[in-house]
Image (cartoon, rainbow, N blue to C red):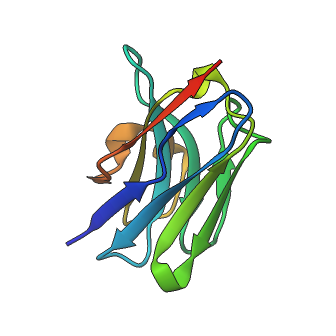
């Protein structure tokens, strides 16, 4: 059974950084998406990571201030986010599908396993 456990969300001030974690179990080859959902808004994919190739992709909203890394020994993927802004506030989710990442992986409905989410709040 595939499961994802997220952590790392917090309340921070503008300009600070956070590192979100997603610990994966029950699957070894996958495409992982990181999503953000602000109150009243649709879930937005902000990054993706291909376990097989190590390829990462970022949305324009976080490009240049975010980076994905992984710790294979811990089966954990990290999303480092720097220079956080109020518009980064939201619930953050990781999701996986046993597949290669593609243009389809931008859609939340493409993924079949989700983490429980972790809240990020950025205050000015």
Residue 34 location, x and y as percent?
A: 50, 47
Quadrant of image for the C terminus: top right
**Going by the picture, which residue comes out furthest to the left?**
1
Q: Quadrant of residue 62?
A: top right
Q: Quick check: 44 above or below 108? A: above
- Outermost residue, top side: 40
Task: Check the image and name the residue furthest to the right.
Answer: 64
Q: Is residue 15 left or right of residue 41?
A: right
**Image quadrant where residue 88 sits:** top right
**Quadrant position of the N terminus in the picture:** bottom left
User: In this orientation, does residue 96 appear?
Assistant: no
Q: Residue at (74%, 32%) from the top-left corner? A: 15
In the image, taking residue 88 as reference, residue 29 lies left or right, namely: left
Q: Is residue 76 left or right of residue 24?
A: right
Look at the picture and state if 86 lies above or below 81. above
Give residue 41's position: percent from left, percent from top. Answer: 41, 17
- Viewer-closest of 101 and 45: 45
Residue at 68% from the left image edge and 44% from the top image edge:
17
- Count of numbered circles on the image: 0
* Residue drawn where x is 34% and y is 75% of the image: 27
Residue at (36, 46) in percent of width and height: 110
Residue 40 percent coordinates (x, y): 37, 13
- Is 68 or 103 nearer to us in this picture? 68
Q: Is residue 55 left or right of residue 37?
A: right
Q: Is the residue 26 above or below the residue 112 in the image?
A: below
Determine if residue 27 is in view.
yes
Q: Nearer the viewer, residue 122 or 40?
A: 122
Is residue 123 or residue 92 the one in the foreground?
123
């Amino acid at each position: 059974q595939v499961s994802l456990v997220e952590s790392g969300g917090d309340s921070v001030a503008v300009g600070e950084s956070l590192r979100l974690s997603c610990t994966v179990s029950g699957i070894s080859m996958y495409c992982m998406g990181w999503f953000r959902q602000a109150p009243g808004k649709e879930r937005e994919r902000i990054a993706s990571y291909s376990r097989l190739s190590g390829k990462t992709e970022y949305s324009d909203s976080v490009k240049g201030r975010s980076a994905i890394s992984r710790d294979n020994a811990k089966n954990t993927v990290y999303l480092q986010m720097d220079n956080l802004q109020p518009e980064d506030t939201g619930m953050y989710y990781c999701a996986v599908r046993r597949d290669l990442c593609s243009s389809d992986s931008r859609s939340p409905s493409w993924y079949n396993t989700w983490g429980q989410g972790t809240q990020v709040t950025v205050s000015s």
